[in-house]
Amino acid sequence: MADLHIPDALLVKNYVDGNEAALATLIKRHESKIYGFIYSKIADRDISNDIFQDTFIKVIKTLKSNSYNEEGKFLPWVMRISHNLIVDHFRKTKKMPMYRETEEFSIFSVMSDDALTIESKMIVDQVELDLKKLIEELPDDQKEVVVMRMYQDMSFKEISELTGVSINTALGRMRYALMNLRKIIDKHQIILTN
């Protein structure tokens, strides 16, 4: 079983150089982790299988077109592809869970947890309607963390592994995203009571 000791980067190179078996080894090596990740977010075996296959179709296309340059970080790269496909799936089915299911957010910590007045409740509903538009205005790195954390309920550890940054960086991006969202909310003249 010499394959076990071949680093991912070398298997990628071998596959790009025409060794089809190298890809099979890579898939076998990582399939339980990648499939497990997909299934943990989708919770449907058929859809998870589809996304798993789509992930590797994308991997193959990228490798075949010689546009892979992840410097040996094969698994986080594949996980990012599968994550993007999961987000696409939620977008298509319009079944993205609303962020308020995660207590931690309480309207991005810009509102108190006290009982909402009717006016505040209306504002909250408006913010919810505008939420996707608001998030679109964030820089890409912040937007990515917000979507993973809020819509996919991923831990900062998972986010850090997927995006290839430290947990502190992921937390920092989230903090900046919340600050920016407050500014964006102000810009849109949505007044939230403290």
Image (spheres, rainbow, N blue to C red):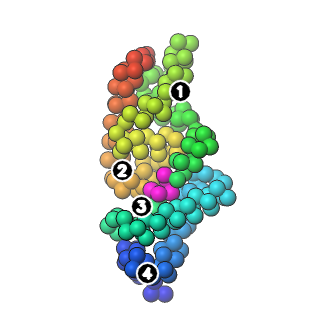
According to the picture, the residue beneath numbered tag 3 turns out to be 77
Of circles 4 and 2, the one toward us is: 4
Question: Looking at the image, is mark 2 or mark 1 nearer the viewer?
Answer: 1
Q: Position of residue 103 (x, y in %)?
A: 52, 33
Nearest to viewer (mark 1 / mark 4): 4
Assess whether residue 11 is covered by the magenta stretch. Answer: no
Callout 3 amino acid: Trp
Indicate the position of residue 59 as horizontal and vertical percent values: 47, 65
* Residue at 40%, 17% in the rendered image: 189
Residue 108 rendering spot, x and y as whole percentages? 44, 30
Circle nearer the viewer, 4 or 3: 4
**Residue at label 4?**
18
Relative to 163, say whether 187 is above or below: above
Q: Which residues are magenta?
A: 80-84
Pointer 3 local density, CA inside 10 Å: few below 14, some 14–19, many at least 20: many
Q: Amino acid at mark 1?
A: Leu
